[in-house]
Image (tube, rainbow, N blue to C red):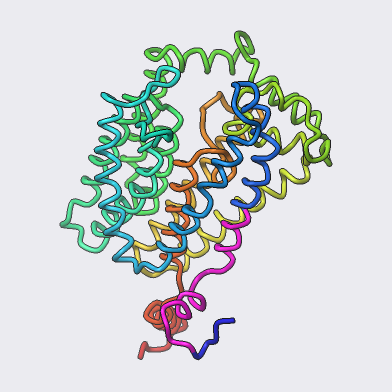
Amino acid sequence: MVSRADRGPLADWFWTIDRFFLVAFVLLMGIGFMLSFAASPAVAERIGLPSFHFVERHALFILPSLAVMIGLSFLTPRQVRRTAIILLVISLALMVLALFFGVEVKGSRRWIGVGTFSIQPSEFMKPAFVVVCAWLFAEHARQPEIPGNLFAIILFGIVAALLVAQPDLGQTILTSVVWGGMFFMAGMPWLWIVLLGGVGTGGILAAYYMLPHVTARFDKFLTGEGDRFQIETAHEAILQGGWFGQGPGEGIVKRILPDSHTDFIFSVAAEEFGIIFCMALVAVFAFVVLRGLNHAFKEGNDFNRFAVAGLVLQIGMQSLINIGVNLELMPAKGMTLPLISYGGSSMIAICITAGFILALTRHRPEKRAKEKSLFRVAQGVPAE
């Protein structure tokens, strides 16, 4: 046990970290590993691989992901910002390379092959983009003469253009919503809200009329016609599970669900463990989002506030989109459930997000002193 009297880096980390966040993230990773046993063997066998191929690869990424999350949680806010800038530059460069030399899957070029593995640069771009935009918004709020908001808009345009070029409508929508939420927190004028809302609506309409796969997905969702095998099978799996599920390994419908280990792992969880288990899983994601927003509300530093809010909003919106697709509340997006779905790039990227959140919400002495001073001023007591 680490004593409060200790003054080493590990002791300082242990007593300043938000342990509720840490437990929530590790719990989600544990649930994801458990569900990989339920969801992935059928997929592996169907494509001629050993039964536990995806389980073993999922396990292979857990320790590096944990190491990344814990390692990043030691950083100071300034180091988080610098790390994010470097990561964003590298990710954007790789996204450009992926357009020309990437692996094409289902008409999209989002991955770069590295040996037997593939990397999806856009996954690593997301947390870095949030942190860098938070810094730009905070700099503009601190010194209005600095065009931080303008730079954030330009950066968003670059990121959105690269995502559309892949094409990846789901990630484009996710990034747009998170960026818009941060811009709103930064005091976006109502004129900008109207303009950006119009641009967003126009972008979705343009995607619908110009991208055939987007048209097909929206038409399937709105009309119920066409190839709806995955959606209907996922829905059937949820219905079969009932309140308490069929039991571990007893699911039947999951065996014919093509992406049961990635996009539709929530349906597998519902079939084998039931709706109550799924509600508990949703509650964990809700806890992460609400606790993060609570931290942001209390935070006195603009950069920390915008970054924490944006990072937890990213996790929450990605979870919402994935679960919404599983429940037939949204068109199919091809988006993973954070820390639950199979995918090395997704797991490591979400752990980068989690590491940034842990680093920015640590209870540092200078932060506590500032909060105490703000509290005294709010109570009408002169600050010391």
Q: Residue reaching furthest left?
A: 145
Residue 126 is situated, as x and y percent measured from the top left of the image, at 38, 44
Is 138 on the left-hand or right-hand side of 55? left
Query: Left or right: 115 with respect to 256?
Result: left
Viewer-closest of 83 and 372 = 83
User: Relative to 229, does residue 87 appear above or below in the rendering?
Assistant: below
Most frequent secondary structure within the magenta stretch: helix
Q: Which residues are magenta?
A: 6-27
Residue 245 lies, with reference to residue 148, above or below; the image says above
Give yes or no for residue 22 being in the magenta stretch. Answer: yes
Taking 17 as reference, is 369 above or below it?
Answer: below
In this orientation, which residue lies closer to the viewer: 326 or 156?
A: 326
Residue under the point 58% across and 36% down: 54
Q: Residue at x 75, y 31 (%)?
A: 238
Residue 142, given in percent of the width and then of the height, sits at: 25, 63
Residue at the far top in the pictured view: 226
The image quadrant where one finds the N terminus is: bottom right
| Along the viewing direction, whichever of 226 and 200 lies nearer the viewer | 226
Where is residue 300? Give x, y as percent.
Answer: 39, 70
View extreme (front): residue: 50
How many numbered tags mark residues here? Answer: 0
- In which quarter of the view is residue 228 placed? top right
Nearer-the-camera pick, 295 or 81:
81
Quarter occupied by the C terminus: bottom left
Specify whether residue 282 is painted magenta. Answer: no
Residue at the spot 69% in from the left edge and 19% down from the top edge: 232
